Structures are given as C-alpha cells and as structure tokens.
Amino acid sequence: MSQLRVGVLVSHNGSNLRALHRASAQPGAAFTVAAVISNNSGSGGVSYAREQGIPTAHLSGKTHPDPIDLDEAIRAMLVEHTVDWVVTAGYMKKLGPATLKEFAPRILNIHPALLPKFGGHGMWGANVHRAVLEAGETVSGPSVHLVDEDYDTGEVIAQLEVPVLPEDTIDSLAGRVLAAEHTLLPMVLTQLGTRHRLFLNIPPA
Ligand code: GRF
C-alpha cells in the first residue's frame, strides 16, 4: 500500500520526529519517515533516527562549508529517498534555494505559537512562550505552515489550540504546547498521506 514518504529535518531534541515516527509505526499508517537530516551530529533526533534504522545524515556547515554545496546535499538526500513531503521539526536553519525549488510547496514547518502572532526572527524556544505570556494571551498552541524563503511566513495549514493558564510559567506553557505539537504534526501527515493514497473513480456526470 502506498505511503506518503516524509523527510524530517531536525537540530536538537527531536521529540516531534519521535512523535511522527511512532505514528508511522501504527498499522495502516498513511505515511512513513523515509529520511532524517540534522545540522547537528550530536542531536537527540539523530541518535533516535539511527537507533530506529531510519536513513540519517548529518549535513551542516561543517560537512559542507559552501552553502550551495550544503543545499545540494540536502536536496540530493531527500530525492535519493524519494521523499514526497519535507518537514522541518525544530530545524534551526533556513532551507536553500535548490531544496525549496525541488520540494516547495511540499515543505512544512511546525512553530510553537498561533501564527501569524509570535513568529519571525528571534521567535523560537522560550522567547515564543515568554512573549505569549507577556501579551496576556489566554490561548496558544502550535501551527503547521508551508515553508518559504523566510521564517514563519508561509501559509498556515493547521493549528491546535491549548489554554494559557493564569499560573503558567514559560516551562509549563512550553510543555503543553509541545504535547499539542506531538498530536498535531502526525495528524497533518496522516491527512496528507490519506489524500496521497486516495483513489477516486468518479463516472462522468
Ligand atoms: C518545537 O517546539 C517546534 O515547534 C520548534 O522547535 C521545537 C522542536 O522540538 N520549531 P523537538 O526538537 O521536536 O523536540
């Protein structure tokens, strides 16, 4: 049965990668994690992917000092593993023009706030949740959006709201949003994978 093939780019912990991979291991899953790329050879995401036997590469400014070569190496790895959709999940770098040209609009990013609020340059990690708390928001949650050349500006395709509680700290809010990410991202890939395998034979009217 055909499955959507997903390439995942990570930098650090890789908890979203683990959530995707766990969902892809369910019987009848609509997608599979076909390749993992990290710019950080010591990341938790890389260790996990290697343990699970997922084709994994460390591709960074260390392995490829010229950004054009790095972009091409990332593109080539994703093409080699016949990736249908790319997911940047905690990937702290911008994608280069060759990778964007090959895969856009089939590239998704997950962001830990309800875009278009609390996105853009500098809005990552604790900074996002601090800004949400300082703004007095009562709702937050992750956004999944299409990736373009900039940070957090592509079209939002899915969001999952969680409450912001009066007693929340940055850490408690971050934990609640991250748990929602682990639900949202597999849901989105399941939807995309289901469409990918859907065969419609509609007789002419
Ligand atoms: C997540 O909060 C994601 O929204 C952001 O980076 C974090 C990555 O976490 N872009 P992990 O590496 O998947 O655990």
Image (cartoon, rainbow, N blue to C red):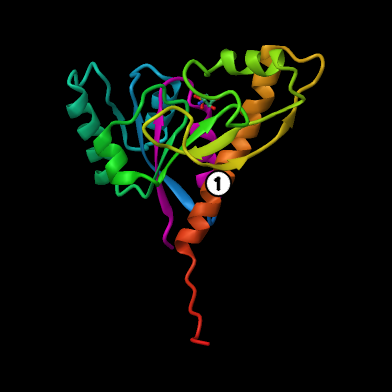
Q: Residue at x 34, y 47 (%)?
A: 83
Give the amino acid at mark 1.
Answer: Val
Q: Residue at x 51, y 47 (%)?
A: 189
Q: Is residue 131 left or right of residue 29?
A: right
Farthest residue, direction right: 166
According to the picture, the residue beneath numbered tag 1 turns out to be: 188
Asked where in the image residue 10 lies, by quadrant, the reply is top left
Circle 1 sits in a helix, a strand or a loop, which is it? Answer: helix
Q: Residue at x 47, y 71 (%)?
A: 199
Q: Is residue 141 above or below residue 6?
A: above
Nearest the eye: 115 or 52: 115
Magenta segment: 1-26
Instruction: Give coordinates of residue 175: x percent, y percent.
Output: 66, 21
Q: Is residue 25 visible?
A: no
Instruction: Give coordinates of residue 50: x percent, y percent.
Output: 37, 30
Q: Quadrant of the N terminus?
A: bottom left
Would you say residue 197 sits in the magenta stretch? no
Would you say residue 9 sits in the magenta stretch? yes
Nearest the eye: 189 or 136: 136
Instruction: Give coordinates of residue 151: x percent, y percent.
Output: 44, 27
Q: Residue at x 17, y 21 (%)?
A: 66
